[in-house]
Image: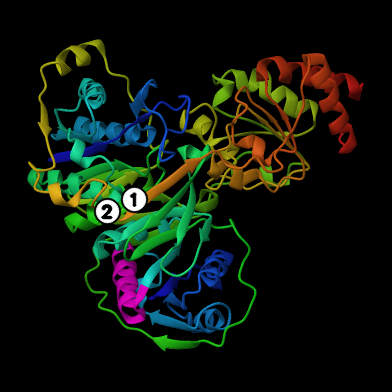
């Protein structure tokens, strides 16, 4: 049985939790677990991974992989797959992970499964568990032959054991690079910093029209002394600016109270708010995934509930 | 310049999702379909590129008869011609099988640019775009929220976590897998819809494209064993009753949080 190769995700000089979460899933399967650390000046990170989850970590240090680059990462990962004899390649489902992982699968003519939140089974009988239909249903997949899988960050506990692994230097031909990394631009911080709000009232596609945000959602936020937020489809439609977006590509918030109005609860939105202290969800669709993370749910028309709640809160405050 | 746009027709985002008989997908018989949301932004960006200079926009999609409607919509929006791979033998393909079909089309067409959506609203695999690029031996960029073309140089901004952006340059030919919100998608005008009736839709099979033995359930290396409603677990405490009753109970919860 071949090994599992985990491609480490390094951010701001640290091996991300996502890598150790993948290591925890890998440890369950009974496969030997190896790692790959790519970058420049990342020897310490490779050492850390060899002591926490991997029996061997391949270290590839090169200017070509100092920043994420689809061509250089692709060549480096393929070299590591060869060197490790891996049957299964695990990559965190982050912006660089989802960029390169499908290409690795195509290059290896391998099976591909993305955004898994669990791996079940052992040996050659691994089941990959993930969500479909924007989080509304779960799916179990099996694969034949070599497999590349991406793992959803934050879906599971990080590996907290120790391994007595070694670090092996790896080189690869990284000369065929066509894509060029230019720069990373930090997020623009204009508008309300939702991460500081005690209360956030967010609207989703169910709010139906842009004018309903100032008419219906903002008043409840105001009555509660909080801020208004939005899910991605609202921002995509141009109803509100990106500054209001709550989610993995917007702001991740942990207010005392989060009220989700007409939001179905796609994964990337849940990532942005599931850490809230208390969540109230209002949605016409009782099957909406938002009800899985909410503390309290109301299956009803938000246009009935929200204005009435706004009035009641205002009255209670006197 | 030639631009290829890969479209997928998916269940409408409000469609009722009932798991089918053998539990491996949803029942598709009596639901509405639409073009995958991500692909509408891909098509729009292709059309904007065409508007800015001389280009031919070719749209391609795989699936049964109903896919014709999606292709007519794309042609009505301004695409020049369409390719419809209609072949039962392609059913049950995994992402790589689909990518092989689309790559075969791309090899015949030799586009300068390929636009796809980042993922499909049904499977959410986010695989086919980059796979097609790998099979074509061209560079790719995913989760694109800004796109510029100058001569044979593409500059994109890729969406990172927390609203950060990664600026990347790619030479053409290349593939761009777009994120929703990249642009504002146009509606097909009445004139466009009428003109679309005369635009060609080329129907092909996997065999026509030389990939017959690489597609379908038999060739698929990743297989969906089951699809199911997630176990409800703890979930939310559901509050029921009249509007007044519901609001009263919510007010109590809000008071308990010390917010009033």
Q: Position of residue A166 (x, y in %)?
A: 49, 89
Q: Residues within 10 Å of mark 1 (few under 14, many from 20)?
A: many
What residue would you read off at disc 1?
B127
Instruction: Give the quarter of the image for residue B25.
Output: top left
Q: Residues within 10 Å of mark 2 (few under 14, many from 20)?
A: many
**Position above or below: B139 against A196:** below
Magenta region: which residues?
A69-86
Q: Which mark is residue B13?
A: none
Q: Position of residue B51 (x, y in %)?
A: 21, 30
Foreground of the two, B173 or B54: B173
Circles 1, 2 touching at the beta carbon (< 8 Å): yes
Residue at image location 44% in from the left, 39% down from the top: B23
Q: Chain of mark 2?
A: B
In magenta stretch: residue A44: no
Give SS at disc 1: loop
Residue A35 in view of the camera: yes
Give SS at disc 2: helix
Q: Which mark is residue B131?
A: 2
B148 sits to left or right of B22 = left
Foreground of the two, A49 or B140: A49
Chief secondary structure of the magenta portion: helix
Instruction: Give the quarter of the image for residue A89.
Output: bottom left
- Colour option used: rainbow
Q: Position of residue B248 (x, y in %)?
A: 85, 21
Do the residues at discs 1 and 2 belong to one chain? yes
Q: Position of residue B174 (x, y in %)?
A: 22, 51
């Amino acid at each position: 049985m071949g090994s599992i190769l985990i491609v480490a995700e390094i951010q701001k000089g640290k091996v991300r939790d996502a890598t150790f979460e993948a290591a925890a899933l890998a440890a369950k399967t009974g496969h030997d677990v190896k790692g790959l650390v790519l970058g420049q000046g990342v020897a310490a990170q490779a050492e850390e991974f060899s002591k926490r989850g991997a029996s061997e970590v391949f270290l590839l240090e090169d200017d070509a992989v100092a920043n994420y680059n689809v061509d250089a990462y692709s060549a480096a990962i393929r070299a590591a797959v060869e060197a490790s004899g891996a049957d299964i390649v695990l990559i965190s489902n982050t912006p660089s992970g989802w960029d390169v992982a499908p290409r690795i699968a195509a290059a290896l003519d391998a099976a591909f499964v993305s955004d898994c939140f669990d791996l079940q089974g052992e040996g050659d009988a691994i089941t990959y568990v993930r969500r479909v239909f924007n989080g509304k249903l779960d799916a179990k997949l099996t694969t034949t032959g070599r497999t590349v899988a991406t793992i959803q960050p934050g879906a599971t506990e990080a590996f907290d054991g120790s391994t007595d692994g070694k670090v092996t230097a790896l080189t690869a031909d990284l000369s065929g690079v066509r894509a060029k990394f230019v720069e990373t631009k930090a997020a623009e911080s204009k508008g309300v910093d939702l991460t500081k709000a005690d209360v956030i009232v967010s609207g989703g596609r169910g709010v139906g029209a842009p004018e309903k945000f100032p008419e219906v959602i903002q008043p409840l936020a105001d009555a509660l002394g909080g801020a208004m937020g939005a899910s991605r489809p609202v921002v995509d439609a141009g109803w509100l600016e990106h500054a209001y977006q709550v989610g993995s590509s917007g702001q991740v918030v942990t207010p005392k109270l989060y009220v989700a109005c007409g939001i179905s609860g796609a994964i990337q939105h849940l990532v942005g708010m599931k850490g809230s202290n208390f969540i109230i969800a209002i949605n016409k669709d009782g099957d909406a995934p938002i009800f899985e993370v909410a503390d309290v749910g109301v299956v009803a028309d938000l246009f009935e509930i929200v204005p009435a709640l706004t009035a009641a809160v205002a009255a209670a405050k006197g | 310049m030639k631009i290829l746009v890969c479209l997928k027709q998916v269940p409408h985002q409000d469609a009722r999702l009932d798991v089918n008989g053998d539990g491996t997908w949803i029942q598709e018989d009596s639901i509405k379909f639409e073009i995958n949301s991500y692909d509408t932004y891909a098509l729009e960006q292709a059309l904007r590129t065409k508007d800015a200079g001389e280009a031919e926009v070719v749209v391609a999609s795989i699936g049964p008869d109903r896919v014709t409607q999606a292709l007519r919509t794309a042609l009505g929006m301004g695409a020049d011609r369409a390719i419809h791979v209609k072949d039962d033998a392609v059913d049950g393909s995994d992402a790589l099988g689909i990518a092989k079909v689309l790559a075969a089309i791309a090899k015949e067409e030799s586009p300068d640019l390929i636009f796809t959506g980042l993922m499909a609203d049904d499977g959410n695999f986010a695989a086919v775009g980059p796979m097609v690029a790998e099979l074509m031996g061209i560079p790719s960029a995913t989760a694109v929220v800004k796109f510029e073309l100058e001569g044979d140089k593409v500059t994109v901004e890729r969406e990172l976590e927390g609203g950060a952006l990664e600026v990347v340059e790619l030479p053409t030919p290349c593939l761009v897998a777009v994120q929703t919100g990249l642009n504002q998608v146009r509606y097909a005008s009445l004139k466009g819809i009428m003109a679309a009736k005369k635009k060609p839709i080329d129907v092909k099979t996997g065999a026509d494209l030389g990939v017959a033995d690489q597609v379908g359930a038999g060739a698929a290396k990743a297989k969906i064993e089951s699809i199911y409603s997630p176990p409800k677990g703890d979930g939310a405490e559901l509050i029921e009753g009249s509007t007044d009753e519901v609001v009263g109970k919510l007010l109590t919860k809000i008071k308990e949080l010390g917010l009033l």
